[in-house]
Amino acid sequence: MDLSERFLQELGRHNYVTATSYLELIASFRQLLTKRRQAVMEAKQQYVNGLDKLAFAESQVGEMKMELVQLQPKLEEAKIENAHMMQVIEIESAQVEAKRKFVKLDEEIASGKAEEAQALKNECESDLAEAIPALEAALSALDTLKPADITIVKSMKNPPSGVKLVMAAICVMKDIKPEKISDPSGTGGKILDYWAPSKKLLGDMNFLRELREYDKDNIPVTIMQKIRGEYLTNPEFDASKIAKASSAAEGLCKWIMAMEVYDRVAKVVAPKKARLTEAQKSLAEIMELLNQKRAELAEVEHHLENLQTTFIEKTEEKARLEDQVELCAKKLERASKLIGGLGGEKSRWSQAADDLQIIYENLTGDVLVSAGVIAYLGAFTSGFRQRCTENWSKLCREKKIPCSEEFSLSKTLGDPVKIRAWNIAGLPTDTFSIDNGVIVNNSRRW
């Protein structure tokens, strides 16, 4: 009220203070304090966020530098290891190739030996092919004989000469000696007779089985010489002739003739069989050695394959490390540029955040004075407003209400962008005109 009276005395102008003005003060204070606190805190938070991001970037730079320091030795170690493995692989590849050539050479030798053995086997089989049919026929003939047929021959008291001739040859084949008997012609001398031993032989239950299992591959030379010299040259030693006397004797005759053919062929084949046995033995030895070398080759090939697999894995690991180093270096470069570019901003942002914090802390008093200006001082001139706001600010400090040392309505409630727009639109740039614009902009009544 004192201010209104002085205003009337000095300038002759009336100013009326009503209860509505007080209510305007209270409402404006509440509204403006909340609004300004939010605005100032948001502005401060933007700077704080920026500072946090700068701090994070700086910490990331430190981490990336540390990561680079840790990655570089690993990368160098990977390069050295890869180079060493490459040398080892080259050496072992050459060794494997050399061993492969030796194995191939041994395979060629083994193949030659196998061909030689097969040729000998084929030759033996070809030679034996001459005797096998006759032998099989003789064995078939033996199979047709029955014990009763043998018994008939045995029971002959005076067998035909052909039967006796065949049985004598059988005794020779079985190396059974003849008996000496008196010459039936009455000369008084002794002759060799095979019939008595033959009858004894015919009485043997295993006679036919022993003939079937006869060791045809090892017939003594003396026996075959005697068979060929004394029996096969005899015109009477003929299966067709003997068949007339006895079918059993015919079968035995065929058997003897087949044994002679087989023996003749076997004697020719025997050296070839020996060579075949030797060739097969040599082949078996070569194959054993070859298989051993093949196993060794497979082992070194497997080892080489493992080395190559490991080398590929190590190469991939090296490439991954190189990518990591390159990516980390690029990130570090970008971050360093960013921090370098914003290095000056950091102190400015920090100061701005601190200033905004001070403004925030002083908002209670500043907004209270500002609300008073809006509610009561709109009609007053600049000088009256100045004296009044100074008194109010002093009173706030006395009442321990935080406020700025130098109160400014435009700084407390003004928006720099809007003020600039007002100036462009023609509003004078003096403090009084700008404060009037702020009052109008924030007043609830106008």
Image (tube, grey):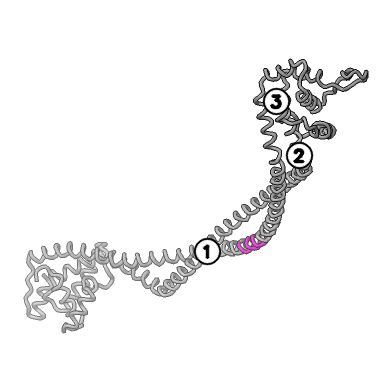
Report the disc number at residue 266: 2
Q: In the structure shown, which secondary structural element does the residue marked by tag 1 occupy?
A: helix
Q: Residue at x 56, y 65 (%)?
A: 72
Main SS of the magenta segment?
Answer: helix
Report the disc number at residue 352: none
Rendered-image quadrant of the N terminus: bottom left
Q: Earlier in the sequence, mark 2 or mark 1?
A: 2
Q: Residue at x 14, y 62 (%)?
A: 26
Question: Which amino acid type is shown beneath numbered disc 3?
Answer: Lys
Q: Measure the alpha-carbon separation of dots 2 and 3.
A: 31 Å
Q: Specify whether 188 is left or right of 258.
A: right
Magenta-highlighted residues: 82-91
Report the disc number at residue 244: 3
Q: Nearer the viewer, mark 2 or mark 1?
A: 2
User: Residue 310: x, y in percent?
Assistant: 58, 56
Are dots 3 and 1 in contact, CB under 8 Å? no
Q: Which residue is mark 1?
A: 319
Residue furthest to the right in view is: 188
